[in-house]
Image (cartoon, grey):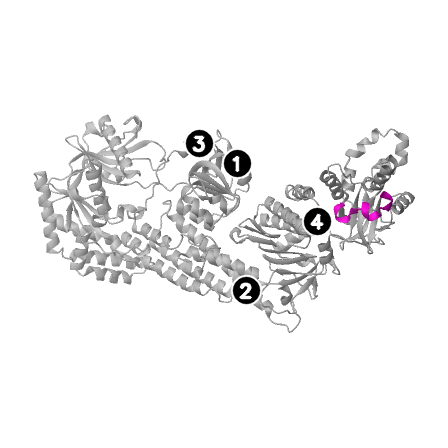
Amino acid sequence: MWQRLVKKGQAAPFQTELAEKYANFQRLLAANNVILALMTDMEEKLSGDFIFDLQYIRASVSQLAEETATLVDALNGLGDQRYEGLIEAFRSIIAGVEGVLNQRREIQKAPLTISFDELDLEKAELVGGKNANLGEVRNRVGLPVPPGFAISTYAYKLFLDYNQLATRIPDFLGFWRVDDMDSLALVSDKLKSIVNQAQVPPELEAAINAAYEDLCRQEHAHPLVAMRSSAVGEDLSLTFAGQYATYLNVAASELVNRYKDIVASLFTPRALFYYKNKGFKEEEMAMGVVVLPMIDAKASGVLFTRQPEASDQDAVLINAVWGLGKYAVGGVIDPDHYWVAYHPPGEIIEQRIPPKKVMLVNVPGGGVQEVPVPPEQVNAPCLGPRHLQELVQWAATLEAHYGRPQDIEWALDFEDRLWLLQSRQLHMLPKRAPEAKARTLKQYPVLLDHGSIACRGVGAGPVVIVRREEDLKNFPQGGVLVARHTSPKYVTVMPQAAAIITDAGSPTGHMALLAREFQVPTILNTGNATQILQPGQEVTVDANFNNVYAGIITELLEPRQSKTNDLADSPVFRTLKAVLKKVVPLNLINPQSETFTPAGCRTIHDIVRFAHEYSMREMFRLTENEVQGGNEIVDLDSGLPLKVRILDLGGGLKRGWKRKVRPEQITSLPFKAFWQGLTAMRWPQGKPAGAQSLSSVFVKSEAEVAQGADPYRDQSYVVLSENYMNFSIRLGYHFSVVETYVSDQINDNYLNFTFRGGGSTPERRERRARLIEAIIDRMDLNYQRQGDTIEAKLSKYPAEQMAHRLILFGKLTLYTKQLDMVLFSEGIVDWYIKDFIREHIEVKA
Amino acid sequence: MSYQKTAKDLMIPLEDYPHIPYWFTLRQAMAIVRETAIKFEGQFEPRAVLVFDEKYQLMGILTLRDIITGLEPNFLQETSLIKMDPSLTVLMGNFYGPKMKEQSQRPVSEVMSPTKVTVNAEDPITKPLYVMIKENVGLIPVMQGGKVAGMLRLSDLFGEISKMVLGE
């Protein structure tokens, strides 16, 4: 094969061709990394620790599409357009993703008003989050919520349609550009006035009034009401909290007007800014309205079932003011502050009762006003022990029901009854980056305390060392997978794995993505986990803090605060989830499988995996392709009995004018490392002058192979670039190939070593293969052996580790050559194995 | 009938004899000696290792004596030391110093003994006996068709003579 490369004859531009291919290879690697990083970033957004918007998804998807197109194109450039099927696969996947992004959700048809009696969380789309939560608490949780009704999002749609607003609003929005704040105010004013001038359809007006009449019959009174916005998605994002209008103590005659005011509040400048800037769609802003009788409140306030900054504290935070609750949150007065324990329930951990001089109260005919607090109440606490106990019980009930911390508004009426007026998810502060407060529990034996976290969490179980694919069979439920490398093949056991630990690997690699998808706590790049952890040993893996402890530590395993995912139910979150379903899952797991084809690619991840795998195959066979010899080849002038021809793809060497280069002129990183190893060994030099040699009837086959041949006459070839090396080495009849890429990008790095055997008796060939196998095994590589052909692979190790392996391969290459003569017994093979390991592997600097 | 035996009958085939390439170190040679002793479990104590070049041509023989001298312990070099410490007790330190380790990295080609004499495969055993005593060597290559086919050791010849003398 190599002979073709150097066939004498016309000089063809083969170097240009190779350089082009290599450029494609690098383009592919670059795209590969960007895509993996993008996927990682998008998956991380699903953890709930981040706030993001539709714009983010759009931008990510468009970058993903662009990079994937580059990747596919680069692979085709590298492989002479052999992978055109991948273009088709890519197009159809991207079309699917864009389909998800452009999906419009129609506002569902529903009654115009719906009584609280019929509401629960599942109706959130119909009535908005605030209504749905009140229904949920009233009907499913059983806490006291005043009776009331919701004006549905379908009513909103009817209102828009009746006034032809559905088309006029987007038209107006089109006039405004994000960077133009003046026109924003203008557009906002215009839209608000359009809504104000709009007619509530008679059908809707009748429905609202009828619902109010029903409420009156139920209450045996004609109460004034509170009307609050209940937009779809309003509760889900911090950015929308409290933006929309609320009207207190509304008279029956004002219901319809206030309804329009609330709808108009969708178009405040602030709301519009988010609407446009964050890529929300009209239907995702659909407005429902809460209507409930106004509670004549003696005191009101807010309750957090956890303190947002200290979510691990088992206590409830309560604020209280006299009168209506608006002052508890508005910052007008300093409210009472109670920090109350869950256990024992109601026990005050801390309280602060500042003077409360004013309060907000209902005006009998409608509206509210501020009045002075009666002097005897100014310094008195608003709540007594009984109230606190009841509120703590509510908090416990609600947390248990929702599985998440809640933010509650409550009111205490003059009959000393507590009412729940609102319950929504509490927006916890984003969890601090664990690096900032790395934690190692000193009281337990720490086995490992370093690595790269790929998926956070804690898992425990017996260690299962996975060295080969077969080890994945019978992987036990709850086992901790420990391996040298990451491999997408581990996906098959992820559902039952308690945790994953590897010696090498990158958190943006394929397997890391999968670990996050399956939520398996995962620590990568520990360096030596496979050496430190023993099979069957029980360990606890704390992938929040990069620690592995001996034994099962229940303290760490106790279910911590359930995941607080503020956005989990938001449209934008659902969209990201749906997009990622078409991006992240990996179907192409085994390159040997029949479905490992372009047609088998169903996600972007599949395409990346396929392209990466085949790019390496293309690079490996680059040198076997039909390329003609030319003048660009230079010879290595090393002074050693080794003939090396060099083909530089760019950046591999500093070339002078001569046809020969000295090893010092070579700048290729992998070559330098490999050469260092090769030259560190003793070469057959310094044959004593005048020594008589007697030809011998040595081991016949060896003598025959060697007969008449100068064993070192054979030509070796190396294709180089700054980061790449493909070295085909012939030492006598030994032939091996080292193909490698070494850079600062851990994800790109790989090394393929192939020993293609040499002559000798079957017995000796077997011994030689055993020696190579044993040494490679100690170098922590995956290898396969067939006869005396050995293939070893290594990938995703940091550059210095790659270089270290290359030095060892340089040494090993010459070592095996040197040993040809002496492999006369199994014992001596053992000694040479041990000697190499002792002299070269265990003495790592 | 012993008197009919030839060199070929008593020689050890070449591939069964420990052998190394000439660029090997003394240290590597010593490992070979030890492994060979283990391999043959006392039936065969190697007194030497054959040294070949890369074309599998026999270049020389490395005896245990060659190895020890090659390690150059001081007491073998400096006779004045021996005069001062005739019992060599003080010089024991030599064995533990760094010098021997250093010397063990020397290539065997520097210390091996060249093959001075050979015998032919068909020669009666009296011939190698004569040559070995005369040349003071314990090991001699046996040539067949112009090539080295095996090695004959003085101890094998001694075994044959013993049989005759002891009448077995």
Q: Nearer the viewer, residue B107 or A637?
A: B107
Q: Secondary structure at mark 3?
A: loop
Specify whether disc 2 shares its chain with disc 3.
Answer: yes
Identity of the amino acid at label 1? Gln
Residue under label 1? A534
Compute the Cα span from label 4 to label 1. Answer: 34 Å
Identity of the amino acid at label 4? Leu
Residue under label 4? A819
Q: Crowdedness of circle 1 by 10 Å Cα count: few (<14), some, many (20+)?
A: some
Q: Nearer the viewer, residue A464 or A779?
A: A464
Residue under label 3? A553
Q: Could you say which disc has been placed on residue A21 in the image?
A: 2
Q: Earlier in the sequence, mark 4 or mark 2?
A: 2
Span shown in magenta: B1-18
Q: Crowdedness of circle 3 by 10 Å Cα count: few (<14), some, many (20+)?
A: some
Q: Earlier in the sequence, mark 3 or mark 4?
A: 3
Identity of the amino acid at label 2? Lys
Q: Secondary structure at mark 1?
A: loop
Which x, y percent locates residue A677?
Answer: 67, 50
- Foreground label between 4 and 1: 4
Which x, y percent locates residue B116?
Answer: 87, 49
Q: In which chain is the residue bearing label 2?
A: A
Q: Could you say which disc has been placed on residue A720 in the image?
A: none
Compute the Cα span from label 1 to label 3. Answer: 17 Å
- Foreground label between 2 and 1: 1
Q: Crowdedness of circle 4 by 10 Å Cα count: few (<14), some, many (20+)?
A: some
Q: Secondary structure at mark 4?
A: helix
Q: Nearer the viewer, residue B26 or A348?
A: B26
Report if the CB atoms under discs 2 and 1 are less than 8 Å apart.
no
